[in-house]
Image (cartoon, rainbow, N blue to C red):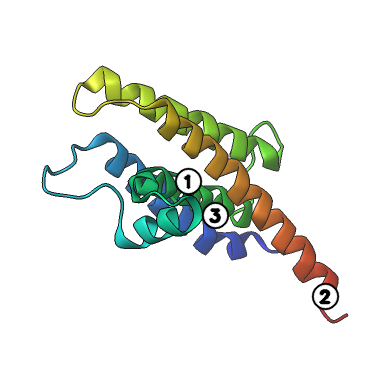
Amino acid sequence: MKRISYLWPRILFGLLFALVTYLTLTPNPDDVKAGFAFTRWISTTLFGDPKLADKVAHFLAYSALGAAAVWAHLTVFSKRRGSALALAAYGVFLEWLQGVGGVRSPELADAIANGLGALSGATGAVILANLMRRFRKP
């Protein structure tokens, strides 16, 4: 695959990375419910508790980052799985940084959702790519 074909996935990854970082480190407005309506619906449907919408949002954001890293062919230590592990560690680091900044409170459950999301998104993207290759016409 030509190097230019990685341009748009890398731009997408960069935009997602910047957005997730910004949203993680800026204060929440007081009048905003935890999570979006979509994540409240998912958490109610899957777990029976709309209060878990925030964790679902963390998981989905880092899943998107993990998948985008795979599609962009990003590597860490010359390994594609290294990018997913680095994103998981980054999610944990940002949660810790929230506590240092004093603007928001860090939560272990958010850090876990971040890490699991990054690993799941990357794994899902690899599985999807393998399936697409397998069923692509020769």
Q: Neighbour class for label 1 at 10 Å: few (<14), some, many (≥20)?
A: many
The residue carrying mark 1 is: 59
Among numbered discs 1 and 3, the one appearing first in the sequence: 1
Above/below status of 130 relative to 92: below
Whether the residues at callouts 1 and 2 have beta carbons within 8 Å, the answer is: no
- Counting every numbered tag in the picture gives 3
Q: Neighbour class for label 3 at 10 Å: few (<14), some, many (≥20)?
A: many
The residue carrying mark 3 is: 68
**Residue at image x 19%, y 41%?**
28
The residue carrying mark 2 is: 135
In the shown orientation, is residue 5 left or right of residue 37? right
- Amino acid found under the numbered disc labelled 1: Phe
Marks 1 and 2, Cα distance to the nearest angstrom? 29 Å
Marks 1 and 3, Cα distance to the nearest angstrom? 14 Å
Q: Quadrant of residue 3?
A: bottom right
Whether the residues at callouts 2 and 3 have beta carbons within 8 Å, the answer is: no
Q: Position of residue 72 (x, y in %)?
A: 59, 54
- Amino acid found under the numbered disc labelled 3: Ala
**Residue at image x 47%, y 52%?**
60
Marks 2 and 3, Cα distance to the nearest angstrom? 22 Å
- Amino acid found under the numbered disc labelled 2: Phe
Q: Quadrant of the C terminus?
A: bottom right
Among numbered discs 1 and 2, the one appearing first in the sequence: 1
Q: Neighbour class for label 2 at 10 Å: few (<14), some, many (≥20)?
A: few
Above/below status of 37 relative to 32: below
Dot 3 falls on a residue whose secondary structure is helix
